[in-house]
Image (spheres, helix red, strand yellow):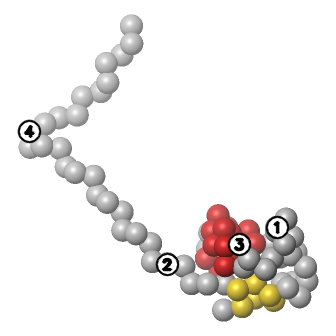
């Protein structure tokens, strides 16, 4: 998908709009090497908006061994 830059657009804002997470702006930066190094966007610039790769599934934490309890850490005295 492509997005034509409008006044006020930034990669941060575009990532928030298209990905729901403005911290994904680096995906847009990496997909658009034609953009200036200072990341300034000009009205009319075209920004390619790639699909995000699927998220890696979270690795569940192992359950404690049966009968084991979790004790608080010893306090420093």
Q: How far apart are the alpha carbons under marks 1 and 3?
A: 9 Å
The nearer-to-camera label among 4 and 3 is: 3
Query: Do callouts 2 and 3 mark residues in contact (Cβ within 8 Å)?
Result: no
Q: Residue furthest top?
A: 77
Sequence-wise, which precedes: disc 1 or disc 3?
A: 3
Give the secondary structure at mark 4. Answer: loop
* Residue bearing mark 1: 37
Give the secondary structure at mark 2. Answer: loop
Sequence-wise, which precedes: disc 2 or disc 1?
A: 1
Q: How far apart are the alpha carbons under marks 4 and 2?
A: 41 Å
* Residue bearing mark 3: 29
Task: Mark yes or no: residue 13 visible.
Answer: no
Q: Note whether 15 is above or below 74 in the view shown.
A: below
Q: Dot 4: within a 10 Å radius of its alpha carbon, few (fewer than 14), some, or many (20 or more) residues?
A: few
x and y percentages locating residue 35 in the rendered image: 81, 76
What residue is drawn where x is 85% and y is 65%? 38
Quadrant in which the C terminus is drawn? top left
Q: How far apart are the alpha carbons under marks 4 and 3?
A: 51 Å
The nearer-to-camera label among 1 and 3 is: 1
Question: In the drawing, what numbered circle is on residue 61?
Answer: none
* Residue bearing mark 4: 67
Sequence-wise, which precedes: disc 4 or disc 2?
A: 2
What residue is drawn where x is 67% and y is 79%? 31
Q: Is residue 57 left or right of residue 14?
A: left
Q: Dot 1: within a 10 Å radius of its alpha carbon, few (fewer than 14), some, or many (20 or more) residues?
A: few
Q: How far apart are the alpha carbons under marks 2 and 3?
A: 15 Å
Q: How far apart are the alpha carbons under marks 2 and 1?
A: 24 Å
- In this rendering, the count of numbered labels is 4
Q: How far apart are the alpha carbons under marks 4 and 1?
A: 57 Å
x and y percentages locating residue 68 in the rendered image: 13, 36
Query: Do callouts 4 and 3 mark residues in contact (Cβ within 8 Å)?
Result: no
* Residue bearing mark 2: 53
């Amino acid at each position: 998908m492509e997005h034509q830059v409008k006044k006020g657009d930034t990669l941060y804002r575009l990532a928030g709009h298209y990905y729901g997470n403005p911290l994904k702006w680096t995906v847009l930066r990496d997909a658009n090497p034609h953009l200036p190094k200072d990341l300034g966007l000009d009205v009319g610039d075209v920004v390619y908006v790639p699909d995000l790769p699927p998220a890696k599934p979270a690795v569940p934490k192992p359950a404690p061994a049966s009968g084991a309890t979790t004790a608080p850490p010893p306090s420093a005295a």
